[in-house]
Amino acid sequence: MKVINLRATLAALLILLASPVFALTLDEAKARGLVGEQSSGYLGVVTGSPSGEVKALVDDINGQRKALYIEKAKEAGVELKIMELRTGERLIKRAADGEYVRTPDGKWLKK
C-alpha cells in the first residue's frame, strides 16, 4: 500500500514540476496569433474563446505591466494613463511581422 501511495505522490510531484515547462510563453502566444498588443499598453486576447492558459498569461503579463507603468509614471511625474498610452504605441511599433495589434477602432490587424 505504501509503495503505491509513494509512486502516486512522486508521479503527481513530477507532473507539477513539469507543468511550467509546458506553459505557454508570451512569444508563443503572439506567434500563434492568440494575443496581441493594444494601444492601451496591455495585451489583448485575439481569439474569441481563449483557453484558461491564454487568459492566465494575459492577466499575469498585464498585472506585471501595470505595476511597472505605475512605478514609471511616478518617476516621470505623469499620469498612469499617459505612461500606458506611450508604452502601448511603442509596443505596437515593435510588434514583429505576423503578430497581431489592435487598432484604435478595436479591430485586430496582423502586421
Image (cartoon, rainbow, N blue to C red):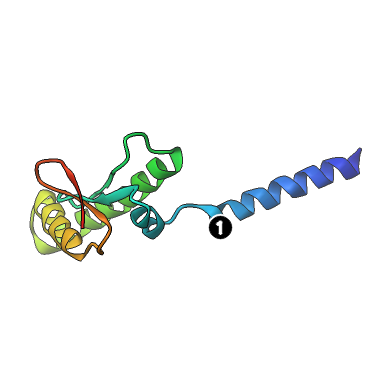
- What residue is at 32 percent from the left and 40 percent from the top? 47
Mark 1 crowdedness (10 Å alpha carbons): few <14, some 14-19, many ≥20: few
- Residue at the extreme top: 49
Specify the quadrant that holds the C terminus. bottom left
Q: Viewed as shown, does residue 5 lie left or right of 12?
A: right
Q: Is residue 107 visible?
A: yes
Name the spot of residue 25 as percent of width and height, x first: 43, 56
Instruction: Tell me the quarter of the picture where residue 59 sits.
Output: top left
Q: Secondary structure at mark 1?
A: helix
**Which x, y percent locates residue 9?**
76, 44
Q: Disc 1 marks which residue?
A: 21
- Quadrant location, the N terminus: top right
What's the residue at 29%, 43% (across, down)?
46
Looking at the image, is 94 positioned above or below residue 41?
below
Find residue 77 and report its image quarter.
bottom left
Residue 67 vs residue 14: left or right?
left
Question: Could you say which is closer to the camera, residue 78 or residue 13?
Answer: 13
Residue type at mark 1: give it. Answer: Val
Along the viewing direction, whichever of 8 and 76 lies nearer the viewer: 8
Q: Position of residue 19 (x, y in %)?
A: 58, 51
| Drawn side of residue 51 relative to residue 42, left or right | right
